[in-house]
Amino acid sequence: MSRGIKDKVAIVASSCTPFGEHWDRGTDDLLQQAAREALDQTTATPEAFWLGTAQSGMSGITLARPLGLEDKPVTRVENYCASGSEALRNAAYAVASGAYDVAMAIGVEKVKDSGYQGLNAFPIPGDGTGRTLTAAAMFSLVIPAYANRYGVSSDDMREALAHIASKNHANGAKNPRAQFRREMSTDQIKASPKVAGSLGVLDCAGVADGAAAAIVVRAEDATKYTDKPLYIKALSFVAGSGSGLTDPSYDYTHFPEVESSAKDAYAQAGVTDPRTAFAMAEVHDCFTPTELVLMEDLGFSERGTAYKEVLAGAFDLQGDLPINPDGGLKSFGHPVGATGLRMLFECWLQLRGEAPAERQITTNSPGRTLAMTQNLGGYPGEMVSFISIVGTQLA
Amino acid sequence: MRGILAAAGYIPYRRLQRSAIRDVMGSGGGKGTRSVASFDEDTTTMAVEAARNLGPLNARPGSLWFSTAEPAYLDKTNANAIHTALRLDEDVAAMDVGGAIRSGVGALKAALEGNGTILVVSSDMRTGLPTSADESQGGDGAAAALIGDGDVIAEYLGGASATREFLERWRTPGSTRSRTWEDRFGESMYAPLAEQAWNAALKAADVTEVDVLCVAGMHARSVGRVAKRLGTASTIDLSQTVGDTGTAQAMLQLASALETAEPNQIVALVSLADGADVLVFRTKTKATPKRCVEAQVSEAADIPYSRFLSWRGMVTPEPPNRPEPARVSAPAAERGSDWKFGFVDDDRPLADTQGTIVTFTVDRLAYSPSPPIVFAIVDFDGGGRFPMELTDVDPDSLKVGDRVEMTFRKLSTADGIHNYFWKAMPVR
């Protein structure tokens, strides 16, 4: 468990480019846009930079070159699909340590230059015995495992997963930055061609290009730069040991790394009842069963009950706990290194009341000033999990 | 007493109905089936499976000799991968015996007439152009025999050969097809050579009667004629089920004969390949391989002709739009060779351990030489779990709780490097 940096660091700017297949724009263009839009929001001038990208560039020069940064510390970080969150975490710690007063976290991924479907990991030389499955196939293992363990009929399971995708499509349709802006009925989602196991194409996140950024400062300086800062309440990160793949007790109905990072984050922030603590949460819905299981791993639902709450609309935009009001990975799209900071951007808009009216949540009240981002990388059994909690009020 | 200490065959799970060739092409084909190596098998992997079918070896081999007409590598010795997959000691020599059909029976004969304990393995994959006789009459398979002194299951009584230079069947390196001269020319060569070797072998073995006869050879007309002429009580014929497995055929027939022949019978093996070789044995006890040839002949599943053609590289379906696997790192593979080739985890031979499917999925997006990939989480008997690709499986009939056993396969090939590792398949 960590001590955390509750209320020591504030976010004073947050930006996000549109996500999508940006055939006409490269990594440099996306970084420049995200950085510019963040810098335009505040007079704070970053002294140090952390860039999260899984495989769109190596070293800090990937950012320093397009921004024309001279004599600045620029660090590239990578932690699977949580690379953008890793940038935020490092920038926040740099400010909390006192080393810098202002730092930028930025994430980018230029996925669509590869020419392949889905996401593809950079090959590391090895003995050739490693698993070569797609992420879709690994997460598809969750569906029968969950249904078997909790006695959920395959029809109910299918309906709950389709509801998640449909909800995220409905939210994304109200988001001008989202990759997919079309509402999708659960019937359409259920009828989509199968990719792996019973996972259809429409159960999978959009694969997109994009960038997102945030500027962090010392909490005591925050109001110098913005009248509505967000304060960092918790940053937790867990890298699993990969033992789930070879652990006979692991049953693919939960993600221990997420449970562990949630516990740490709640302790840092002082959250005791997660279901009522948050005005909203952004979670890593790379595939529909992922979002389902996350509702339980994050303590929003009791074990084995999330599918019922999903079907009851508890996590819809107008539900009691809106999940992925921006459309999530599913419909906003998933530029790997940008996703964690994209999640933060939605918290920024929603908690400040700046989301477009048609998707502005109504759960933020004096009692609910917190929002969460949950960002993971890897697969069931072999996962990294990041959680941030941000809030509008200093304790 | 020198002879065969153990013998076993390996026949891949898949079959091509010969009639399917005519259905598609309008000609070719014929009656019966031929065996088909899966897309993830090659002569090296089939050789491993044949040797594994021997069961635990009752004598330690000093050498491993591998013969094939379809080597996975040239220059590099293919027997090394077999050696390591079988977890043989480092002081066991491993050698390839080169390219001709005759090399299979040749290695067997050299071992029988040599010294020490020798593991002889032969494997072959036969392909021809669509509608050709080689395509329909050929087969894929492997066989293994442990040769040595002492407690043999069949004593080697003697043998003889006859050799003459003539052009009957040939293939230039790299070609996917073999060429043959007019059928009757080969027949005019093999008939007298067979008779010459046969008479000399019976004399050398000091026998006059033979109880079980195996006649192997790619020249079907001569094989039929010689078998008829030498006519004995019992012959081993795999031509209607497996097809002719080239270099492996002689030893595969012998393995089958030794599984069925009664003790104290005379078994003669006649091989017609660029000459004639005759080996004569007296059985002591029946061979008891892990899986007998007969069971492997009967437990099989058909594949469509289209899939056969794609597995043989005769047609190339559009692959998933995903990157192909990177090549294997030579140092990484060497450091992990106990794991990669031997499938040993913490001194535990998972290769010999069965398991149960905990859950599985079908990946329609991942790259595979023959999509889709069927993938399962496998819990091993006695503890331990490993996520594994399944093979020789019908995903529609697969269930959680199904039992699986391990098989040595080729996952992919990149930069000319074959990536060998283990997969799981249903226990049959």
Image: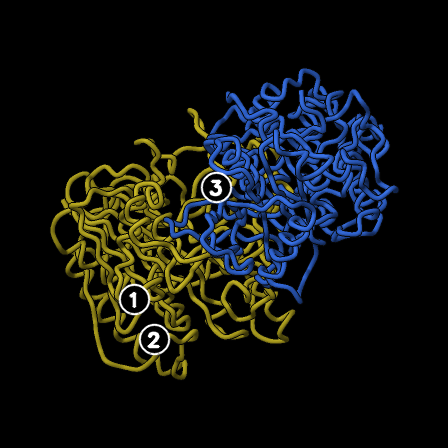
Position above or below: A68 against A90: below
**Residue furthest out toward the left:** B115
1 and 3 marks in contact (CB < 8 Å): no
Q: Which mark is residue B74?
A: 1
Mark nearer the N terminus (1 vs 3): 1
Residue at image x 73%, y 40%?
A346
Q: Chain of mark 2?
A: B
Q: Which residue is mark 3?
A: B424
Residue at image x 24%, y 47%?
B146
Give the alpha-carbon distance from disc 2 to disc 1, as whole Å: 10 Å
Residue at image x 21%, y 74%?
B163
Chain in blue on the image: A
Residue type at mark 1: give it.
Answer: Leu
2 and 1 marks in contact (CB < 8 Å): yes
Mark nearer the N terminus (3 vs 2): 2
Residue B132 visible in image: yes
3 and 2 marks in contact (CB < 8 Å): no
Dot 1 lies on which element?
Answer: loop
Residue at image x 52%, y 31%?
A96
Q: Chain of mark 1?
A: B
